[in-house]
Image: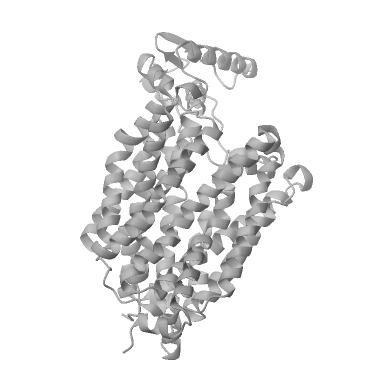
Amino acid sequence: MATVEGARFARTDDGGREESHLRLVARYGVRAVRLLSGGSLAVYISKTFFSGVNPTAGFIFTLLGFAVRPFGAIVFGRLGDMVGRKYMFLVTIVIMGLSTFLIGFLPGYATIGIAAPVIFIAMRLLQGLALGGEYGGAATYVAEHAPSNKRRAWTAWIQTTATLGLFISLIVILVVRTSVGEEQFGAWAWRVPFLVSILLLAVSVWIRMKLHESPVFERIKAEGKTSKAPLTEAFGEWKNLKIVLLALFGLTAGQAVVWYTGQFYSLFFLTQTLKVDGTSANIMVAVALLIGTPFFVFFGSLSDRIGRKPIIMAGCLIATLSFFPLLFKALAHYTNPTLEAATQKSPIVVIANPDECSFQFNPVGTSKFTTSCDIAKSALSKAGLNYENVAAPAGTLAEIKVGETVVKTYGGKAADAKEKGAAFDKTLAGTLKSAGYPAKADPALINWPMAIVILTILVIFVTMVYGPIAAMLVEMFPARIRYTSMSLPYHIGNGWFGGFLPATAFAIVAAKDDIYSGLWYPIVIALITFVIGMLFVKDTRKSNVYHED
């Protein structure tokens, strides 16, 4: 029987040219177009398209693309196993690229009313569906071309596109923002990254039109072994469904939370919690991405020698042990030392009747926080500050103690609640300022080298868990149902476990009153993946990508 590598070289005129094309696909293909717009623009999107609805709900709606990614994996994965890899990821890149580009032209709520959020949501759903089919097609296509001893090194280029896409996103946003100023950027120039994405779409489509179909798929098609019902085979037969579940809980769930923590939550934490200005935070993360990205290829090549599983499991474990003490607390120390000092010198305590205290997280904006305890906690949550809780007798108004200073709250249902609220906000702001709590991080006190070192370490954790994942997922499943089988666990892991990490982490922070407590979510998920992966997942380094069982 001919080897997969033999089939590959027999059907291409120039092996070097084919490899060059594959690397270009990996570099420009998977997510660069979509990530060019990036989550960094979510606040501007919310203001533009959801100004007539609840702003928090608007922000949640911008994340809908994550929710539908597994459904795109099912739809396009099935077609990819039946029709072919090349055609599906050509279709998905066009859908994803055009929907991203069109957002740049979409009028806002002030112009076309409720149609604006409706159309925007439709574009986000198309993006999510397309991305759900994009990754599996690209990973399968590249891996099925690659020699067995270089499969991870080749697919490592796919993994770099997510990071390079985020890097390009940050650079484009930074250039546009500094060129036109913050006011104009918020008014209209935030659309520029969406419009620029058409250039990457054109490059991707041009390259993909020139590529041949996967030799593995052509072979099983010629032998009449393609699946007639990929969904039934992948998820209806226990021997395959078991591997899907192991891939999800023993690999992609942990990989996703480490990835989103290192590349997205770190940026959110810098800007929203540590109050670092957006330009500085973007530069820090961009530099860290630039330094860390080559490690995708390093760990990819290493996994071809020692195996995929050891590197992914080590990344999950090291990340969970490092998130709290070495990284995020150190990040606070080096970027906003004034906040750290104020927290230690003048700790904040909320003294309130526990029965009047609600959970301070309402993503759809339906709840009204009107008790004195809720008013106190809401003010501190918005400020991103740590505080402790002390019980008070029933019937007493809540108090906020900042160091030795006490700030009285008020009842939100009082007739003069608006006036009392304004006075309370002013008093609290003055008290926090007197206690040394900064409204924003002082740029002069930011230790740039150490901040970049910490962020680079986070990116290296990402490269450990994310670098080998494509090859391992491809190698876990039979060729006839590979596209379908690998796409679903990948997109449940990265779309749900990873995509909703910021919202989940914020909910935990709101519940625990501790700005670092949101890290428990990625830590717990990554540890679960480490345990399941170590006990039940087999390494796949020596697998044959043509295997049918």
Task: From the top left corner, tell me how far across and down residue 215 is, in percent.
Answer: 43, 81
Task: From the top left corner, tell me how far across and down residue 396 is, in percent.
Answer: 45, 14
Residue at position x 27%, y 54% in the image? 313
Residue at position x 39%, y 27% in the image? 334
Is residue 88 visible in the rendered image? The answer is yes
Task: From the top left corner, tell me how far across and down residue 162 is, in percent.
Answer: 48, 54
Q: Is residue 184 above or below residue 20?
A: above
- Which residue is situated farthest in the top direction here? 404
Q: Quadrant of the N terminus?
A: bottom left
Is residue 352 visible in the rendered image? The answer is no
Q: Nearer the viewer, residue 133 or 381?
A: 133
Residue at position x 59%, y 48% in the image? 61
Query: Dividing the picture into quarters, in which one does residue 521 lie?
Result: top left
Residue at position x 64%, y 58% in the image? 199
Q: Nearer the viewer, residue 83 or 297?
A: 297
Q: Nearer the viewer, residue 205 or 526?
A: 205
Task: From the top left corner, tell me how far across and down residue 203 is, in percent.
Answer: 60, 64
- In the rendered structure, the answer to whether residue 363 lies left or right of residue 217 reads right
